[in-house]
Amino acid sequence: MPLHQSKAHYVPLDSVRGLAALCVVVHHFVGSEILNTILPHRAWIDVAFFHNAWLCVDLFFVLSGIVISMSYMQSEFGRFDVREFVARRVARIYPLHLAMLLAFLSFRLMKLGLVAIGVLHFAAPEMAVNNYFSFIVNLLLLQASGIIDYLSWNGPSWSISAEFYTYLVFAAVMLVAQAARNIRMVYALSGLLVVGSLGIILLVLRMESLDFHYHFGIVRCILSFFLGVLTVRAVAMVRPGASSLLQSTVQIGAAVTAIVIISLVGWVPSISFIAPAVFAVLLGSLMVFPRRALPELLTAKPLVWLGKRSYSIYMVHALVLVLIEYFARGVGAARFQSLDGLLPGLPSSALLVGFVAAVLGLSSLTYATIEMAGSRLFLGLIRPRPAKSLAAAE
């Protein structure tokens, strides 16, 4: 068995997911309109890569396709159970999604309560479209289905919405392949879904890049997810024996290409369409060549820690950002400008460090108390036997 790999699990992929989640966190900090008006100088933070790190979401989608395919294609194809599959997926994503949705609701109600008792004169919502209808849409994970044409409440959760219904598409693919008693049918249908979703994006939705979410973002997810499924098949077909130099060149070349694409996509939006393929090559090369420097680096304990909490990091950071924005407005632009006079970029850098530290701290807490515990609780409620650990479920 290849280094770092156990059944349906590969440590460097977790680390990549953690790094990508961190990039999205910084991306939303950089893109905050409130912070942009308060912070006078953003120095090194204000770079193209962080501005365009929304593309890391497509890396998540490719990764999900790889992980799900590894879990269900290698050992469970012949005994794939839709009920069990859906239960595991709901247990994996819904407890934390629900908790954060309620946290945003509680924060909103708290502000309205402060207005009612006269502490505040006006309490603007974090998003102007945080209403009862959008709350129900979020509750049902329909944010990426085109029902509403805006992001609301916990904005980043749109991708969780897209991913959940993509899971159901994968389940349908598995059932068709099972009925045909041919595992190759999974890959044939995956190829059709990749081509079909790309065609819908270009010809029906007429998108000029992959930067869309509430407007049928599920199609964007299907494209990258099933590319991930095909990546697992491609990895299995690669013959060992490539030179160490070639292995490292492929891995580092794919990583550099991915960084360049993310950095340039703001100027050349159409380049985003090749990003999922580059991500697939990068992730696939980490799996095929596990003994090179890059995958070894990705097994470092801090990165593994980050990877395990990547879902929590992604889900909690929007709420932390709202709190950081309130803090910045309370401090005031004048104080930040005086600090900026000491060293250009000092206040923005310090605020970013505080933001990231708060996200990591809160995500570590939600990982243990909501993400993992909630998953075990949910599986325990729907099963007659003790729930499996999340690690086993994954």
Image (spheres, rainbow, N blue to C red):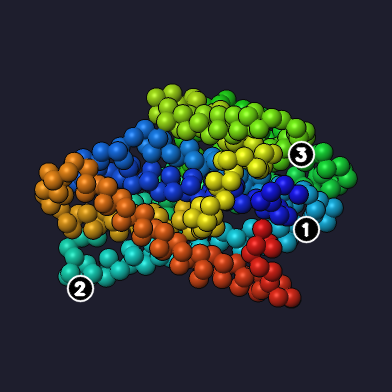
Select label 2 or label 3 by which is in front.
3
Q: Nearer the viewer, mark 1 or mark 2?
A: 1
Find the distance from the CA under tag 1 to the CA under tag 2. Answer: 53 Å
Q: Quadrant of residue 308?
A: bottom right
Determine if residue 222 is in view. Answer: no
Where residue 38 appears, as percent x and y from the top left, is: 19, 46
Residue 225 screen position, x and y as percent? 63, 41
Asked which quadrant contains residue 340, the reply is top left
The residue that disc 3 covers is: 236
One can see residue 299 in this view: yes
Q: Disc 1 marks which residue?
A: 81
**Amino acid type assigned to the residue bearing label 1 in the image:** Asp
Q: Is residue 305 above or below residue 46?
A: below
Circle 2 crowding by C-alpha within 10 Å: few under 14, some 14–19, many from 20: few
Name the residue: 20% across, 73% down. Answer: 117
Neighbour tally class for label 3: few under 14, some 14-19, many 20 plus, Cα within 10 Å: few
Quadrant location of residue 251?
top right
Residue 133: x %, y % from top left = 44, 56
> Mark 2 or 3 closer to N-term?
2
Q: Which residue is mark 2?
A: 117
Residue type at the position of mark 3: Ala
- Please tell me which residue is depicted at 69% across the width and 39% down the height of the picture: 288
Residue drawn at point x = 40 percent, y = 55 percent? 317
Could you say whether the residue bearing mark 1 is in a helix, strand or loop? loop
Along the horizontal axis of the image, is 259 left or right of 196?
left
Relative height, residue 8 to residue 365 (above, below) = above
Which quarter of the rendered picture does the C terminus lie within?
Answer: bottom right
